[in-house]
Image (cartoon, rainbow, N blue to C red):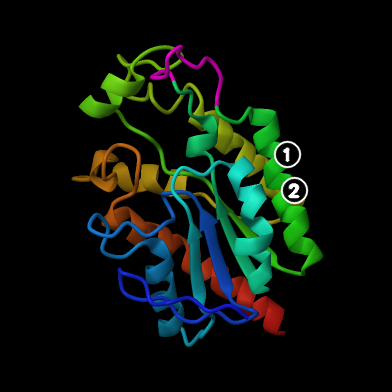
């Protein structure tokens, strides 16, 4: 089986059949210089603390949609023969590139195709007897830079939720429904971040690096949400 060289943010274990693959876009991928430990690294530490030696491989790639994910699913995920696959996509799929000339008017991946791509990945994973965890995305919030680039319809620059609610929230509803209909585990990161932000002294902005990507605190929260679900699946498979 292929192995992974140590990463720049703490190192990644060699991959063997039966491990875990975290599959996603830039909210999953390593971000040297910006994030000290992404959630896959934190998840690995949490599993070791629970006497679980499953290796965790990070297969995140910035800018990816589910269309890109399908194209590399065999090579970057299934070829590793994982026991558990964590899937998180949606921010890039739902994006409308209004900054282009001429401006785009539709998401990069239509919502029905996005749903079909998620279902395809679940089916392909099951053919290899891999368990799937679907994760919702983190919410988005405006920053001055994001308003400059995206602050026009269909987005709503005058609303605090105007970079998120018009499109991404709907794609997250698809994630939840697909997880339920396919009876796969759902880790609702979006809901967890909103809960965290509602606590005294907390905010959603404090969990985001740049309005779009999770910061270290958010990656810690993601790993905290993932760990018990991964352990449950691992123990069920071991029985």
- What residue is drawn where x is 22% and y is 45%? 200
Is 106 displayed left or right of 75 in the figure?
left
Residue 78 sits above or below residue 236 on the image = above
Residue 213: % across, % down: 34, 45
- What residue is drawn where x is 43% and y is 77%? 5
Secondary structure of residue under mark 1: helix
- What residue is drawn where x is 67% and y is 45%? 118
Q: Is residue 24 shown to the viewer in this render?
A: yes
Say which of 179 and 27 sits in front: 27
Secondary structure of residue under mark 2: helix
Q: Is residue 83 shown to the viewer in this render?
A: no
Give the position of the C terminus as an image quadrant.
bottom right
Is 83 displayed left or right of 23 in the figure?
right
Dot label at residue 120: 2
Residue 175: % across, % down: 61, 42
Say which of 32 and 82 sits in front: 32
Residue 82: % across, % down: 64, 72
Label 2, label 1: how many angstroms apart (C-alpha)? 6 Å
CB atoms at circles 2 and 1 under 8 Å apart? Answer: yes
Residue 217 sits above or below residue 144 on the image = below
Mark 1 Cα-neighbour bin, 10 Å: few <14, some 14–19, many ≥20: some
Residue 5 part of the magenta-drawn span:
no
Is 38 displayed left or right of 103 in the figure?
left
Mark 2 Cα-neighbour bin, 10 Å: few <14, some 14–19, many ≥20: some
Q: Which residues are magenta?
A: 98-107
Characterize the magenta stretch by its predominant secondary structure: loop
Residue 50: % across, % down: 45, 83
Provide the residue designation for mark 1: 116
Residue 35 sits above or below residue 231 on the image = above
Is 207 displayed left or right of 127 in the figure?
left
């Amino acid at each position: 089986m292929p192995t992974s060289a140590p990463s720049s943010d703490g190192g990644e274990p060699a991959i063997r059949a039966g491990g875990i693959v975290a599959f996603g876009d830039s909210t999953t991928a390593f971000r040297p210089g910006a994030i000290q430990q992404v959630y896959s690294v934190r998840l690995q530490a949490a599993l070791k603390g629970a006497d679980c030696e499953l290796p965790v491989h990070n297969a995140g790639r910035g800018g990816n949609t589910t269309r890109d994910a399908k194209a590399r699913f065999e090579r970057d995920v299934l070829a590793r023969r994982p026991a558990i696959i964590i899937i998180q996509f949606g921010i890039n799929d739902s994006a409308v590139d209004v900054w282009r000339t001429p401006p785009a008017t539709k998401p990069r991946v239509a919502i029905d195709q996005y749903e079909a791509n998620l279902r395809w990945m679940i089916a392909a994973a099951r053919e290899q007897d891999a368990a799937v965890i679907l994760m919702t995305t983190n919410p988005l919030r405006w920053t001055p830079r994001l308003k400059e680039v995206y602050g026009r319809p269909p987005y709503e620059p005058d609303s605090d939720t105007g970079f998120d609610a018009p499109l991404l929230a709907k794609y997250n509803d698809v994630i939840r429904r697909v997880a339920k209909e396919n009876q796969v585990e759902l880790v609702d990161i979006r809901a967890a971040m909103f809960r965290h932000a509602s606590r005294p002294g907390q905010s959603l902005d404090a969990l985001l690096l740049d309005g779009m990507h999770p910061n270290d605190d958010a990656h810690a929260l993601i790993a905290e949400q993932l760990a018990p679900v991964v352990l449950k699946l691992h123990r069920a498979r071991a029985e």
